[in-house]
Amino acid sequence: MRQAARAIVIKDDKLLVIHRNKFGKEYYTLPGGGIDSGETPEQAIIREMDEETGVVIALKRLVFIEEPGEPFGRQYIFLAEYVSGEPALHPNSEEAALNLKGQNTYLPLWLELTDLDRAVFMSPILQRAILNGVQDGFPATAEPL
């Protein structure tokens, strides 16, 4: 089963997200992606953050595990602290190459937390968990979604 790692990064009341336009379907998602063979979820999210956002993070803890089913597989969602950088795709990333083709695009950006509840977000269950975490605090140990 495919597995992925994603990060919740909040800075100045904004959430770091990827705006996707996947063949006309537009939505937001957390940065992250597939865990490569021999890689831990922690290693994967650090690599994916560099590729997809250029933002440097410090991992705090695993807060959620989501099982959205195929084709997505298990998602490890980490709470992370912003360290430095501004959102931009790494020029040599797979995502940057896809952007050049124009029909399956990735745009890393900061989304106002006040706009998160109205945004089309992948997945709505994770969207609600993030909103609850912002309001009430994120779990001390990983919770299933």
Image (cartoon, rainbow, N blue to C red):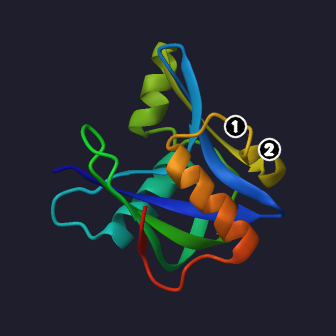
Q: Position of residue 89 (x, y in %)?
A: 56, 41
Separation (CA) of disc 2 from disc 1: 6 Å
Amino acid identity at mark 2: Asp
Task: Give the side of residue 15 with respect to residue 37, left or right.
Answer: right
Q: Where does the C terminus fall, quadrant-wise?
A: bottom left
Q: Which residue is mark 1?
A: 119
In the depicted structure, whether residue 67 falls above or below residue 63: above
* Residue to which mark 2 is pinned: 115
Q: Quadrant of residue 97?
A: top left
Q: Is residue 55 visible?
A: no
Looking at the image, which residue is at 15% across and 51% down?
1
Is mark 2 in CB contact (under 8 Å) with mark 1?
yes
From the viewer's side, name the closer residue of 20 and 101: 20
Q: Which mark is residue 145?
A: none
Tell me where residue 9 appears, x and y as whole percent. Answer: 64, 63
What's the amino acid at mark 1? Ala
